[in-house]
Image: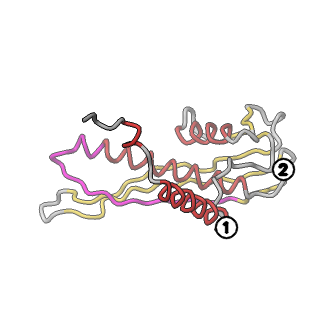
Amino acid sequence: MTAPSNATYSMVNPGRRGCLRLASGLLIASLTGCGFELRRPTTMPFRTVQLSGFRPNSPLEIELRRDINATGSTLVVDSAAQAEVIFEALSDRREHSVVGSSAAGQVRNLNLRLLFKFRMRTAAGRELIPATELLLARDMSYTETAALAKEQEEEAIFRAMQSDIVMQVIRRLSASPAP
């Protein structure tokens, strides 16, 4: 007796194939009916922007510049003469403070804060976004026996907070009035 060919084992039951088609069709129909839509790139109501007021080699400015240029609809320029709007950084501060310590005076908990204050105006001076302050705070445990690791953790938390600030700024810029 010969073994059956592989073709008979790989066939799907014709009744089951119909059920699979029906289920996939219902899934597609339910997704289109619920308003599901992929996220689109952010668009801004202006074509060019100048970033000013940042300290030299500011990581916040670098990330903001990259994200604005990635929109495809807006370009960061270097001179105010080329810009439709001017985005001014008024304050960019990182702070950490001790919020908990042991009975022996050893630090146990830190509070990390990132403060960013900005405004946006047209090249002619009309204010589009008044002075706005964004503040993020995170708590972090601290152990002196792992000081180097905790320093790296603190830097990672500040980078994550910076990315959150940049995303908030991008959302505010895209919702700003046209120049």
Mark identifier at residue 176: none
Mark identifier at residue 125: 2
**Residue 144 located within the stretch drawn in magenta:** yes
Camera-nearest residue between 73 and 131? 73
- Residue 152 position, x and y percent, is 31, 41
Helix, strand or loop under label 1? helix
Q: In this view, does 56 lie to the left or right of 73?
A: left
The residue range painted magenta reads 131-151
Helix, strand or loop under label 2? loop
**Amino acid type indicated by mark 1:** Gly
Residue at numbered disc 1: 33
- Residue 47 position, x and y percent, is 80, 41
- Residue 115 position, x and y percent, is 52, 55
Taking the view exactly as shown, the residue that stands out farthest to the left is: 104
Mark before the other along the chain sequence, 1 or 2:
1
Report the residue at 83% width, 34% height from top. Answer: 82
Q: In this view, does 156 lie to the left or right of 73?
A: left
In the picture, residue 78 is in which quadrant? top right
Report the residue at 55% width, 32% height from top. Answer: 57
| Colouring of the image | secondary structure
Alpha carbon separation for disc pair 1 and 2: 46 Å
Badge 1 vs badge 2, beta-carbon distance below 8 Å: no
